[in-house]
Image (spheres, rainbow, N blue to C red):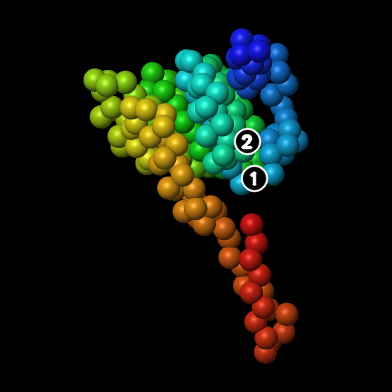
Amino acid sequence: PTRRRQNDLRLRLAQQIERPGVPSDLTIRETGNVEHFALVYLHSTPPDYTTVRRLRSLVNFLKIFNDIDDCVAFINGIVFEKIILVLSNVFCSSILSRIEELQQVYTIYVLHDAGDDIDLFSTQSKIQGFYADVNDVVTEITGNIEKISRDLLTYCSASSSATTLDTVFAY
């Protein structure tokens, strides 16, 4: 039973990794996201099942990539949501110049190995920080998710008559 459960968990995790041949012309809304955010995880190795569960507890829609081109294509296809990107520093030099100015990329968290040179990328405005462990990233996103949600709120003031002001909050 334990071996079968582990195989089932691995299979579910493997299904989360973006693979070539999957239609990429679908926006997140067409595939089921109803949140303001999509969390994108770009790393050469997929996160373990516990980490996936923790990330999904923050942002339900999670896409896991191990290929830069697939990841960039997905990000470019986003229309309505903002991207919270968690990526390995191995990919920084290849991807940051391609996505830094995209409006759908809201914030970036970089995972790095001890001893890696991170000063090269510290000037990127959307990078929130550099983290040695994915659990530190989860903790940081947990602390920031309310602020991020609040930043995405748009306030509109609409008046139905000259004497009455009705405030309408729109997302």
Indicate the quadrant where residue 30 lies: top right
Residue 47 or residue 85, whichever sits in front = 47
Q: Position of residue 101 (x, y in %)?
A: 47, 38
What residue type is disc 1 on? Glu
Left or right of 66, for residue 171: right
Q: CA distance from mark 1 to mark 2?
A: 8 Å
| Residue 130 position within the rendered picture, expressed as x and y whole percent measured from the top left | 33, 32
Residue beneath the point at 73% across and 80% down: 160
Task: Please tell me which residue is depicted at 62% across the width and 38% down the height of the picture.
Answer: 60
Quadrant in the picture for the C terminus? bottom right
Please, which residue is most extreme toward the right here? 30
Q: Quadrant of residue 9?
A: top right
Looking at the rendered structure, which numbered label has been put on residue 118?
Answer: none
Helix, strand or loop at label 2? It is loop
- 129 w.r.t. 12: above or below: below
> Considering only vertical position in the picture, is 85 above or below 8?
below
Marker disc for residue 35: 1
Q: How many marks?
A: 2
Residue 59 at x, y percent in the picture: 57, 40
Q: Which mark is residue 61?
A: 2
Q: Is residue 84 above or below residue 98?
A: below
